[in-house]
Amino acid sequence: MNEPSVSPMHASVLYLRLADFVSKPVVEQARMRAQLEAVAAAGLSVLPERDRVVLEAPDGLAIVVLGNALGTLAAAERCLDAAAVLPLCVGAGHGAVATVEGGGLIQGVLGDGLHSAGLAARFAAPAQMLATRSFRAAVAQQAPVRQADLPLAGTFVDASVRSHDLYVMDRLARKRRRRRLAVIAASSVLAFLLAGGVGRMAYRAEGPFAPKAEVALAISPGGEVFLDGVSQGMAPPLTRLSMRAGVHVLEVRHGADPPLKMDLQLAAGEQVEVKHVFSPLPVLAFDVAPGGEVFVDGKSRGTLPALRQLELSEGMHAVEVRYGAFPPLKRKVQLKRGEQITLRHVFAPAVLVLKVIPGGEVFVNGASRGPMTGLSRLELSPGRYAIEVRNGKHPPLKRTVDLKAGQQVVVQHEFRQKGFWRRLFENDK
């Protein structure tokens, strides 16, 4: 039996919820969960591995962080930046948590911190983070000025008619504070320069006050942007970079695609635009009747006809479709980015045609299939069958046939009456 540990601790918890996740098809759920794991990896890079635990949740992920509410807030902001078009709803809580152990191993985590974060995530809209009062207090304890980043969003009522005061992350608050500080610092520096009689440096293109160069980004479908080896965030939402004049290395990474790398030689105040489209993954579509289970490189990927197409990595893949007793369809396909290939096949039944005069009762593998009337043609799955036709006092017709998919086999026979002399000799015996 799994039991909670006897030493609960206080921790901050992020709950990353995917909106409408449970209503999506299984293939779409797998794709969204893989994207969420990539988003979480980008967001958690600001937290040491030893201080965090990542747990799977029915509609997303839960992240438990020990002793670092401020780092948890930063991770939430990075996750929202990386989410792009993913419908990510984030909840943040702070409270007691305890590990659940079983068989000497940690099986999971439970506690008020996890519950409150999940509750906040359920009220959050896509691209929004809602936090509990306890989480805001934990952030204020580390950096009092940062509590201004979490203004009151309102009072929310849960299914048990209990009220909860939740706070929304104001992602512009820090930028406004930095802008005010930058204005104050710039005014002080300018006053110093003017007092020293060197104010003219502000107008020299090569001086420290020279206007910065700007790079506009148009990246589709998106990617993580690096400038001189340092991550700048995800584009989109990132659309513009500012930097000093000179030589810079710009890199954009998107999944397994070859990264975009550019050397930029920029002058002061210069504005350039970088456009790039990462080719979409190749698509394998299916037109297979009446259906079957699909295997790609030996792994089951779903059942036709519910499964219509698959996004696969570039390269060679072994594709197999299995349907009942039919020989499986096997193909090797070479896929390239941006292309779609349709796999077409019909699993055709085998046909047994009975031309038996004057007729009789038909048996297949010992089971009666009825009289010959209206039963001169049987559609069967591929395989070996024992066929028998019985007609009165005549010896039965017996045949063993091997049927293959799409094959037609004809069985002909005539039950003849015995002649007078033959019946006479048989009676003498």
Image: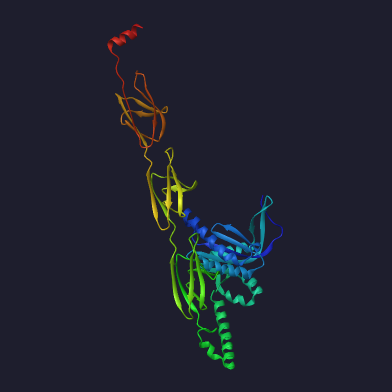
Q: Residue at x 59, y 65 (%)?
A: 45
* Colour convention: rainbow
Instruction: Determine the image quadrant of residue 138.
Output: bottom right
112 or 272, nearer to the observer: 272
Q: Quadrant of residue 171?
A: bottom right
Q: Above or below — where is 413 with respect to 337?
A: above
Where does residue 13 sit, x and y in percent of width and height?
A: 61, 64
Tell me if I can see residue 194 in this picture. yes
Q: Say above or below: 424 vs 214.
A: above
Q: Nearer the viewer, residue 3 or 219?
A: 219
Left or right: where does residue 210 sit relative to residue 107? Answer: left
376 or 347, which lies in front? Answer: 347
Q: Residue at x 28, y 9 (%)?
A: 421
Side (left or right) of 109 relative to 239: right
Is 173 displayed left or right of 314 in the figure?
right
Q: Number of callouts in the render? A: 0
Q: Position of residue 19 (x, y in %)?
A: 50, 62
Q: Position of residue 26 (x, y in %)?
A: 48, 53
Question: Looking at the image, which residue is at 57% across and 74% down?
Answer: 152
Residue lying farthest top?
428
